[in-house]
Image (spheres, grey):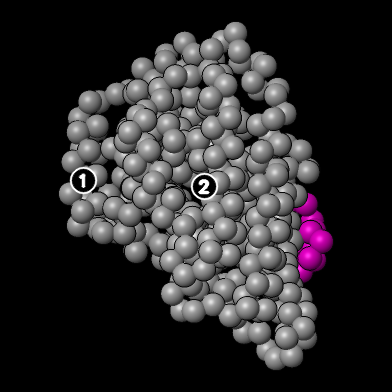
Amino acid sequence: MKLIKKIGFLGAFIIPILVVLGYYGGGFWTFSAFIFAYTLIPIFDECIGKDKINVAKDDFEDILENKYFETLVHALVYVQVGIIIWALCMLAWKPLSYLEYIGFLLSMMSFTGNGINVAHELGHKKSSFARFNAKLNLMTTCYMHFYVEHNRGHHVHVATPLDPATSKKNQSFYAFWVQTVFGSFRSAWKIEKERLAKKNQSFYSIYHNEMLRAIIFPLLFISVLTFVLSFQVGYFAYVVPLFFFSQSIMAFSSLEAVNYIEHYGMVRKEIAPNKYERVNPLHSWNSCHLISNLMLFQLQRHSDHHAYASRPYQVLRHFDESPQLPFGYPVMIIIALMPPVWFALMNKKLEAWQSLGIQETEIRKVIESTI
C-alpha cells in the first residue's frame, strides 16, 4: 500500500479536530467540521479523482497484519467518547448562541455519524476488545442495537424484503428512515430473543441481554453526566441531554442515509420460498472516490465488505463489475435528501446497470482472480 494512502487514513481525525477548533473559534466557525465533511471533501474527491487500485498480492499479508490500521479505529473510539463528554461539559458551562449551537450540532453529527462506521468496522472483528469498543462507540449515539441487527440481521438478509436496512427502488429516504430505524430495532429484539432462548438464558438479564444494555447504558451515561453538570452549575442543565439526544438522532440518521445509498434497488434472486441466492459484490453500490474513501475507512468499497464481512477495511477491494455511484457518500447523502433529484439520477443508473446483465459467475471469477 502506498505510503500516501496509508497516511491518508489519518484524515478521519481532521473532523474531530475541527469540531474542537470550531467551538473555540465561535460564531460561524462552529460549522467548520460540517462544511469540511459535506463541501470540501466532495471538492477534493472531484479534484483528486478515483482510486481503483487493490492491494498487491506481495503486500497483502503485511498490510493485513499491520496493527497500525486497527489502532486508528480503536483510537477514534476514545476520541469520540472524550469529545462527547467535553462537548457536554462546554455546553453546560458556557451557553452558545442559536447559530453556534446549530453549527456545533451539525459538526458533531459529521463526526459521530462516521463514528458509527468505526463501530461497524470493529463490530466485525473477533476480539472481545474490538467488540467492546464497538459497543462503547455506539452507546454515544444511542444505537447499540446496531451491533446486534447489523451483524446477525442485515448481513444475512441484505438485498431481500426481509431486511429493513435495504432500500427499495422508488422509496424515498424519508420512508426508508421510518422503515429502517424502527424495523431494525424490532429485528434486533427478535434476533436477541431467539439467541437467548437457544442458550436458555434469561431475557430479563442485563448481563445476558444485549438489547436491554442497548437501552439502559446510553440512558445511564447521559443521566450521570446531566446530574453531575447540573450540580456544578446549580440548575438543571437541560442542554446536556438535549444536545446528546439531538446529535444521536442526527448521527444514526446519517448512518441510515448511507444504508439507503449502499443498497438502493438491489434485489437478490429468490431461489426458494424465503431463500435467496448468496450475497455477492453485485448487491451493493460502491464509490471509488479516493478522499471520501480514506475518510470513511473504505466503507465505499461496500460490495467486498458484504461478500466477506470480516475483511478489514485496509484490504477491501474495488470491483468494476459492481454498481458504481456517480459521487462519494457525502454528495450522495445530500442528493438522497431530495427524492425527485435522487430518483432522476439513481433510477437511470440502476436500470442501466441492470441492463448489463452481469451474472454471479462472472463476478466470482473476478473475485477469485484477486486476493
> Label 2, label 1: how many angstroms apart (C-alpha)?
26 Å
Magenta stretch: includes residue 200: yes
Q: Can residue 151 be seen in this view?
A: no
Residue 33: percent from left, percent from top? 49, 55
Dividing the picture into quadrants, the one containing residue 118 is: top right
Mark 2 crowd level (few <14, some 14–19, many ≥20, 10 Å Cα): many
Q: Report how many numbered discs are placed on residues in the image.
A: 2
Q: Which SS class for mark 1? A: helix
Q: Residue 116 carries which label?
A: none
301, 199: nearer the viewer = 301
Q: Can residue 359 be seen in this view?
A: yes
Circle 2 sits on which residue? 154
Residue 273: percent from left, percent from top? 41, 43
**Are the residues tagged 2 and 1 within 8 Å (C-beta)?**
no
Circle 1 sits on which residue? 345
161, 92: nearer the viewer = 92
- Label 1 amino acid? Leu
- Label 2 amino acid? His
Pick out the residue farthest to the top.
Answer: 58
Residue 185: percent from left, percent from top? 55, 62
